[in-house]
Amino acid sequence: MTATAAITVVDLRVVRGDAVVLPGLSCEVEAGSVTGLLGPSGSGKSTFLRAIVGVQKVESGSVDVLGHPAGSAALRSRIGYMTQAPSVYGDLTVGENLVFFARVLDMPEAAVDRVLAEVSMEESRGRLVNRLSGGQRARVSLAAALLAEPDLLVLDEPTVGLDPVLRRDLWELFHRLTERGTTLLVSSHVMDEADRCHALLLLREGTLLAHATPAELRRQTGKENLEDVFLSLIEERT
Amino acid sequence: MSMRITRAVALRVLGQLRRDPRTIALIVAVPCVLMVLLQQLFGRHSPVFQDVGTPMLGLFPFITMFLVTSVTMLRERTSGTLERLMTLPLHKIDIVAGYGVAFAVVAVVQATVVSLLALGLLGLDVAGPNWLVVVLAVANAVLGSTLGLFVSAFAETEFQAVQFMPAVVLPQILLCGLFVARDQMATWLRAISYALPLTYAYDALARTAANDVSDVWFAIDCLVVVGSIALAIALGAATLRRRTA
């Protein structure tokens, strides 16, 4: 384990029902960086993220996060987690949702204003979440994950369904967060977001195809387009 | 356990209910209508209405709160918000207690309205103190909601959650002593009735109606009801899993 690893995963094996989702995954995520977890739908991305935040039943292997075993009580105030389906209350307003999570986290109400600005949702504070579009709901869910100014942000497909301007704004936010020392692990199935990450984890059928920077992957495969990089890595394996 | 988080959860649940005025109206109006029906069916001065009316004031909140809580909790489980809560710095018991407090507040409104109607307009006579009827009705509601929280762990869909009402609640109503006095039941049925919390809740209300509250059995009834609520909260918290498959 290097001194700068925020997450260290060794031989992580997860079985759901009779399906082996992660047969034995090992990797490290560098502190203070944006690491992209890329892979097609069903590759095990969400399961991997759930194991890191400690809500996934794990068959074997170890996951250490910020120096503690994943799921430790000590980590709960230090990790912000955004689930793939927006996990906010549809029958409450945007503001009521965030005030609730702020109270649970013992954060002042000013934190609600801060995160609303960070996800550009100030104007929607009084709107009912059920009336929002899918992308807006996802941003409320992200705002809730940002409330406690966590050391580690685990975001499961945070930019799905967003228009390009908002996507750019969110990626700028993610990079600003790394400047204050936050580590981000962001999953996506959109390859064009890969270039915005410092490091990439390419996952397919529960197996890590590569862990490198976008530039290294291009050099290694000789391909320019990251979609082609992924394809040639798959072909190398088979 | 944290008072701050329990309060936050309770306020949130109440905020959600506030957005659903129809449910609130049903919670309060349905028992009132049923009470009027009962009185009209048997007549104001009939012994049946006078004997059954007071325990009914506890049964209605017990049933409605059981249903409302188990469906609300199931929604929390299936919507992903429970998974988020499980990653936050809170104790599982804070969530269950928060739900219990929120539905107790609703139960106070429900029990007060139904009791005022029954004791005032409908002419129900209670020999014991009237305020005790309201307190016991609220205790019934809290018992119902904590049991609902617990069984919601065994339901995967809202259809299943609703089916737990007849499965868990009806046997308790049949055996609590309302239909057949418990000393006239077959021995094995009486043995089962001793194990069911509603038996004690019913008995406490029946004793209040007869002003039999200085009896030691009344104190035992109250202790068992409070103990059952605490046990259901503990079991409800135990069935919340931080890690799921």
Image: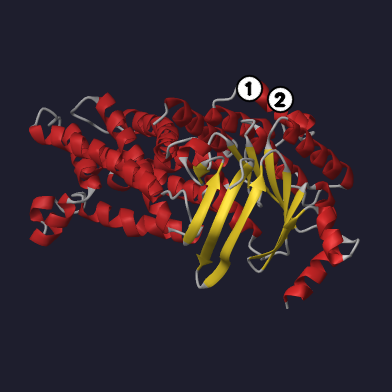
On residue A231, the disc is none
Mark on residue A109?
1
- State the quadrant of the N terminus of chain B: top left
Residue located 71% across and 25% down the image? A113
| Left/right of residue B206 with respect to residue A196 in the rendered view | left
Is residue A114 visible in this depiction of the protein?
Answer: yes
Q: Identify the residue under disc 2.
A: A113
Residue A67 against residue A84 in the figure, above or below? above
- The answer to the question of whether label 1 and label 2 lie on touching residues, with beta carbons closer than 8 A, is yes
* Residue type at tag 1: Glu
Q: Is A37 or A102 nearer to us in this picture?
A: A37
- Secondary element at tag 2: helix
The picture quadrant where one finds residue B95 is top left
Q: Nearer the viewer, residue A128 or A175?
A: A175
| Whether residue B233 is situated above or below residue B239 in the rendered picture | above
- Rendered location of residue A219, percent (x, y): 86, 60
Q: Residue furthest right?
A: A224
Do marks 1 and 2 share a chain? yes
Question: Picture quarter containing residue B146?
Answer: top left
* Left or right, residue A156 beside residue A66: right
The CA distance from mark 1 to mark 2 is 7 Å
